[in-house]
Image (cartoon, grey):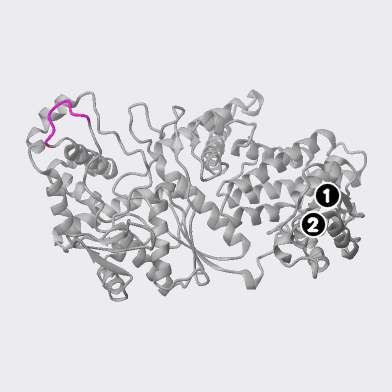
Amino acid sequence: MISAYLKTRFAAALEGLADDVPAALELIRPGQDAKFGDFQANMAMPIGKKTGKPPREIAQAIVARLRIDDLCKEPEIAGPGFINLRLREETLETLLQKCVADTERLGVAVVEPAHRRRILVDFSGPNIAKQMHVGHIRSTVIGNALQRMLRFAGHEVITDNHIGDWGTPFGMIIYGYRHFLDRTAYENNPLEELGRLYRLVRRLIDLAGKPAGTPSAKPTVSDDAGAAPDTDSSDPDSSDPDASSFREQFQEYLDRDIQAAVLEEVAKLHQGDTENRTLWQEIVDHCLVDIDRMYRRLNVSFDHTLGESFYQPMLAPTVESLLERGIARETDGAVGVFFEGEEVPMLIRKKDGAFLYGTTDVATVDYRMERWQPDAILYVVDFRQALHFQHLFATMRLMGYGADRLELAHVKFGTVLGEDGKPFKTRSGDTVGLESLLDEAQERALAVVQANLSPENEGNDPSEKERSEQEHRETARRIGIGALIYADLSQNRESDYVFSYDKMLAMNGNTATYMQYAYARVRGIFLKGGVDIDALRKSGIAIRIREPQERALALELLRFDEALDWALRDYRPNILTAYLFELANRYSNFFEHCPVLKAADEETKISRLLLCDLTARTIRKGLELLGIETVERM
């Protein structure tokens, strides 16, 4: 909000002095030290470098042309040409009142129509042949946060969960279903049984033809027919201390070519075999029920869920079109798109005629452009797919989707690590299931909630105790799930991070628990003082800035829109989490030094209550944009 006002004034002053005014305006930043001012404009140095004039002389020329007296005190030029700006208290007070009155947006303007875009966000995208696990959490929560922030900014957003519902993993499950199904287990818990079959067949493929004692390796079944490679790097380890008994039990299958049998099931599925198609649909339906349940727990939803199977009819025409247009060519029986200066092509059809992940992605972009005409497509996918997306984007440019027509962005992220620095797994070496992750987070959060209760708040009425228990569990759900989401989003998305329940549930530091506590503490003031919030906002009494701590809090509140803007520039939610953490710290300092309910007079009391209310609303809105719920008390 403040930056927008300052940039408007500086834009007029820079005309004729800077050849790239927009770039110069980006150098207006919040001051690093309050004693030098609230904002600092640093464009004099690069302008001086281009023009050959002394930067301080440039700064003086800018200040002489700057009409900013109604917003700021007199600008100061420091050092080689820094322009320091200190806002007038009246300016802060006026802008804060606008935020108080703006119930929904807290003063954050909607993007101007000329800059409004239609943006498709492709995120989560699990291979649904197996249960969701820790490897799926990053794409899911990062993508969800981005789509929420983009919508709030005023863009038109389309979300698509491009699930892996085709290809080799289903051939493995169909083979397992035919040979190893436990019917009772399947009827009681279909997802658990399907997961068992998938792991069993994987292991049989891994061990087939190997003598006892041979080290295990990953199955060699390829990702054919467009099946998406899973974005998790921590599939269950096929090693087992009880390997000899496993070999004994399944020896007859270890003597067979299981891999060929699995690919035969896949081929039948792709050729439309009625039995395999029926079984595939049954498996997909079970899987979708399970992943939808996980999404509900994470408060995530999608506009569309178009799996890879949806695009299968489009793959052959896509390859033929690329061949006809000279974008792809045949080599050694396979078809690929070759790129200048690179030896490795993006294969779109294998020698045996099978299609690949890249084929599906090309067809998907074509479909999305025909149906929705987006201005941008964001792929929230693990960093290990970087080369694939480089090739995909280069292919789309060759197809005529120029950068001026379509932004294609790989919003890549790192890996969730255990404390041993390796991909996060259970002690037995299995991938940590997403459901168990969420359950554990909620149980640990419940312990935090109960530890903060005092006995006198519990009461003796059984019905009251039951209501309290329900409330505690709901609070624990919000805290536990919020902690998981925030722990992920508060990281630089391109970095790996070490998973720790203790750290993410800590009530201090940059955690969701701390943020939720900060919100609950503000709300507690109104409860303790019996304050009617609606009446407070309509009181007609304005916020008054008198103390340094009030001023610091006011400045931070007015930077909410700027934090959102920077977070969306390079699709980094951690910029918003850092802002919320700083806001909570500024509020804590304000609360420590500025009495609220015991303020010296009624006008000061109401002014500070309005600051408290605006802080709570900003924290709640910020967390909401990250996909995190708040709690009224902890």
Give the magenta part as a residue range: 209-215
User: As shown in the figure, which amino acid type bears the numbered disc 2?
Assistant: Ala
Task: Measuring from the top left, give residue 303's x and y in whole percent.
Answer: 45, 62
What residue is shown at x 79% (from left), y 44% (from top)?
553
Residue 161 at least partly seen: no
Q: Tell me, yes or no, if residue 363 can be seen here.
A: yes
The amino acid type, in three-letter code, at marker 1 is: Pro
> Which quadrant would the N terminus be assigned to in this image?
bottom right
Q: Position of residue 150 (x, y in %)?
A: 58, 60
In which quadrant of the rendered view does residue 60 lie? bottom right
| 10 Å crowding of disc 1: few (<14), some (14-19), many (20+) | some
Mark 1 and mark 2: span between their CA atoms? Answer: 9 Å
Q: Where's residue 556, x and y in %? A: 75, 47
Q: In front: 14, or 235?
A: 14
Q: Badges 1 and 2: C-beta atoms under 8 Å apart?
A: yes
**Side of 336 relative to 435 (left or right):** left
Q: Residue at x 78, y 42 (%)?
A: 530
Residue 143 part of the magenta-drawn span: no
For label 2, the residue is 44
Between residue 296 and residue 252, name the one nearer to us.
252
Quadrant housing residue 182: top left
- Residue behind mark 1: 80
* Sequence-wise first label, 1 or 2: 2
